[in-house]
């Protein structure tokens, strides 16, 4: 049915396409970069083919790593040309992709198209004679769609509602297509595609973001049944983000309890994101120590490049709040990391207030930074710090004085009454914040002698924890070393291949730009 | 009886504060609602039906509180939740915050603080709402230990935003008292009876004496309560004199096990 419709639509689209191609040729003549980009895209196709034939996802990963760089370089002309030459004529994606690229393409250079029409028609015919692809590799198909979506998102004005809606329709088409394929070599691409699908929905505002939850859950089910670990990991993080954005914490907690995150398969970035969401859930549910562990792990796992600054900022904010909630004061140096310093100012002030144990200053800080904290979604967590401020105050007092009257405590902590102070101190004693007793009749708090920590087993335990961490780090690194399959047998061959590849690379560098060797990779 | 009639009867019974009657009608209404497909709200049903169903459920929650039927209350709160979701596009119910506030108070009184915070996270601008601010304040005071403020809030009538809060707060009295008793036992070595009575908010001496007898490890002589035994019993789990030797043994064993572990690991590395 759909095929038929597409067929009947074809002529109209073809006219458009030829116009588009003419554009492409024009640009080519003007600046060789278009050719280069086309070349690059085709290189990526070759990697994808290799990934499929060798069952090695590393090639796919490599392609995806290059995506951000490629995204900045592609233009409509090169995209049109690549789409035209790689898709078989009957493929349904072809028209959609062409149309979407066309949309921006026309705006780009309407005027320039005029004169070259007749000439380029000829060129176009020759080109299509040369490349009559009958099939397309699913991986290449999805990759191209992904590239177009990413490119569309990068265009000026892409965040306007109408444009977003349009991009979403393109993404939905890709997702639908993705469902028909069941190939493990697609996993990484699929994960990426889902990510952008969700991102587009999020950009459109909260209502459309919550509306895709069921789609994502469905996809997660499919991915789980197919043992598609990468997509699974990506979807779990997306759904968690979705839930947390609409404050559905209990649903998020249920999801975490009911699914198992494929820790080993997922890439580090996904793992970091997952840990961050876990930490947020745990922090809300008062599991501060596990939240702290997770957020610390997330910070360590996150890519340490400038691209991940946003994530690092969010993670560091959470980590500071959780550390404060646990009753510790974060290290001063955390606040002065060059990339984070500015965004952490509110948290620095909060930490200062907690450290001093001054309730008045704490409330003042809260009022001052309320907006920023609410925007970060940490306001409710910070509110809980009030009790920590009091406890710190009591602890400082118990360390400073061996005996202090309840009245003084009340005055210093700005508590309402002496009675309140008595209860608060009693609770602090029970919670193990301080080691002291209260004399009710005389109305004072008597601190007990501070225990020498080195006479306990505490140092030994800490030592053990550190050694354990080092050992597991070592073991993990040993485990994650990778060796080629059948490496011993194909030693010679791979060496040769490597040399060849090197040579190729060298010639490429020497020649700089030519599209000569793209013949080898053409489909 | 049709759903409409039942609904009218139910509202009437509620307005007359006839809570035994409401509890007999409510199950019938629920069955009818389920038949009409209104138990789980969807966009398919008409807005008027949904509004009516929501109103009945809201009143049901309040009636349950008056009947002190906690299980039914939990069920109803879960059932009414979907009616408040924004996707339905219903006008905001004026009872929504009140019900949320009551549910929060229930969680506080059951000491389910994690659940409390999870709920709180879903509410926006909670502190500026009269109904919501009440349980939030209570939780804060409980956490920091200002039990006298909590006590005032749950015993003085003027403090409650609505009469239903008073009923839920009743159970909080026991929670607070037991919290205080634990704190007192660890913070004092001994305490005169009259002071203890004051601290634990008992009005007569007999009550405090009964209370003291119920507590394990509290001893009463010469008008003083001594907690020495209680403290020792609490500590006994960890480091009583008798078990200290055991503890030492186990630390030695752990030390040996750890060291052997390190040796093994180092061997594998080399």
Image (cartoon, coloured by chain):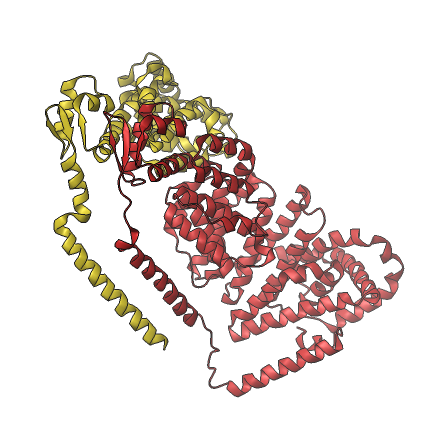
Q: Colour of chain B?
A: yellow
Residue in the foreground of this view, choosing between A30 and B195: B195
Q: Residue A105: image x %, image y %?
A: 76, 55
Q: Residue at x 32, y 40 (%)?
A: A433
Q: Residue A483: image x %, image y %?
A: 47, 77
Q: Residue at x 61, y 42 (%)?
A: A204
Outermost residue to the top: B16
- Check the image and report above or below for A331 versus A508: above
Residue in the foreground of this view, choosing between A100 and A146: A146
Q: Residue at x 37, y 50 (%)?
A: A258
Q: Is residue A471 left or right of residue A321?
A: left
Outermost residue to the bottom: A492
Q: Quadrant of residue A124?
A: bottom right
Q: Residue A193: image x %, image y %?
A: 57, 56
Q: Is residue A220 visible?
A: no
Q: Colour of chain A?
A: red
Q: Is residue B212 visible?
A: yes
Outermost residue to the right: A115
- Check the image and report above or below for B77 versus A119: above
């Amino acid at each position: 049915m759909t095929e038929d419709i597409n067929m009947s639509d074809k002529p109209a689209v073809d006219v458009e396409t030829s116009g588009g191609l003419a554009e492409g040729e024009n640009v080519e003549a003007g600046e060789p970069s278009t050719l280069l980009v086309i070349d690059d895209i085709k290189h990526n196709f070759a990697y994808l083919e290799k990934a499929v034939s060798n069952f090695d996802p590393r090639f796919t990963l490599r392609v995806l790593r290059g995506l951000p760089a490629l995204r900045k370089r592609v233009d409509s002309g090169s995209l049109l040309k690549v789409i035209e030459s790689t898709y078989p004529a009957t493929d349904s994606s072809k028209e959609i992709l062409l149309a979407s690229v066309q949309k921006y393409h026309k705006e780009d250079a309407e005027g320039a198209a005029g004169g070259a029409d007749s000439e380029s028609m000829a060129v176009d015919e020759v080109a299509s004679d040369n490349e009559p692809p009958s099939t397309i590799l699913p991986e290449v198909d999805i990759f191209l769609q992904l590239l177009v979506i990413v490119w569309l998102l990068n265009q000026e004005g892409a965040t306007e509602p109408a444009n977003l809606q349009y991009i979403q329709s393109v993404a939905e088409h890709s997702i639908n297509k993705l469902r028909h394929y069941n190939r493990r070599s697609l996993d990484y691409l699929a994960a990426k595609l889902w990510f952008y699908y969700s991102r587009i929905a999020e950009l459109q505002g909260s209502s459309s973001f919550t509306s895709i939850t069921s789609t994502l859950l469905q996809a997660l089910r499919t991915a789980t049944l197919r043992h598609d670990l990468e997509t699974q990991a990506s979807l779990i993080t997306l759904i968690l983000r979705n839930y947390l954005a609409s404050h559905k914490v209990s649903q998020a907690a249920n999801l975490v309890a009911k699914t198992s995150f494929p820790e080993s398969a997922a890439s580090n970035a996904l793992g970091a994101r997952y840990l961050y969401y876990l930490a947020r859930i745990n922090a809300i549910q008062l599991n501060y120590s596990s939240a702290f562990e997770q957020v610390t792990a997330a910070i360590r796992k996150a890519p340490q490049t400038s691209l991940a600054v946003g994530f690092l900022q969010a993670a560091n904010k959470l980590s500071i709040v959780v550390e404060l909630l646990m009753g510790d004061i974060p290290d001063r140096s955390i606040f002065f990391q060059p990339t984070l310093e500015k965004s952490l100012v509110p948290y620095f002030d909060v930490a200062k207030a907690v450290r001093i144990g001054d309730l008045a200053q704490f409330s003042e800080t809260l009022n001052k930074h309320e907006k920023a904290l609410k925007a970060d979604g940490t306001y409710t967590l910070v509110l809980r710090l009030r009790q920590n401020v009091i406890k710190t105050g009591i602890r400082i007092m118990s360390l400073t004085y061996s005996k202090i009257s309840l009245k003084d405590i009340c005055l210093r902590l700005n508590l309402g009454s002496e009675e309140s102070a008595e209860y608060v101190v009693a609770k602090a004693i029970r919670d193990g914040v301080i080691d002291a007793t209260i004399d009710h009749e005389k109305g004072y708090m008597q601190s007990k002698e501070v225990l020498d920590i080195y006479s306990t087993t505490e140092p030994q335990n800490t030592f053990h924890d550190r050694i354990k961490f080092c050992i597991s780090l070592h073991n993990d690194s040993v485990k994650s070393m990778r060796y080629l399959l059948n490496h011993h047998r194909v030693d010679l061959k791979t060496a040769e291949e490597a040399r060849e590849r090197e040579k190729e690379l060298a010639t490429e560098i020497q020649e700089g730009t030519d599209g000569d060797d793209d013949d080898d990779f053409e489909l | 009886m049709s759903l409409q009639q039942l609904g009218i009867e139910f509202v009437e019974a509620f307005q007359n504060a006839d809570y035994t009657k409401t509890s007999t009608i409510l199950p019938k209404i629920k069955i009818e609602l389920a038949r009409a497909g209104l138990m789980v709200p969807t966009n398919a049903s008409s807005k008027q039906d949904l509004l009516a169903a929501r109103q009945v459920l809201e009143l049901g929650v309040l009636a349950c509180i008056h009947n002190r039927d906690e299980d039914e209350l939990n069920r109803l709160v879960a059932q009414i939740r979907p009616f408040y979701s924004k996707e339905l596009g219903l006008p905001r119910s004026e009872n929504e915050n009140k019900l949320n506030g009551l549910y929060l108070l229930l969680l506080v009184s059951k000491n389910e603080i994690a659940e409390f915070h999870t709920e709180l996270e879903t509410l926006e601008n909670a502190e500026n709402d009269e109904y919501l601010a009440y349980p939030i304040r209570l939780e804060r005071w409980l956490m920091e230990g200002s039990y006298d403020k909590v006590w005032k809030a749950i015993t003085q009538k003027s403090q409650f935003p609505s009469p239903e809060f008073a009923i839920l707060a009743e159970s909080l009295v026991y929670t607070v008292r037991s919290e205080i008793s634990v704190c007192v036992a660890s913070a004092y070595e001994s305490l005169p009876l009259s002071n203890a009575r004051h601290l634990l908010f008992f009005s007569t001496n007999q009550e405090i004496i009964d209370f003291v007898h119920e507590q394990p490890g509290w001893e009463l002589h010469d008008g003083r309560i001594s907690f020495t035994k209680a403290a020792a019993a609490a500590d006994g789990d960890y480091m009583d004199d008798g078990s200290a030797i055991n503890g030492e043994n186990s630390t030695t064993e752990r030390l040996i096990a750890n060291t052997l572990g390190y040796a093994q690991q180092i061997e594998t590395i080399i």
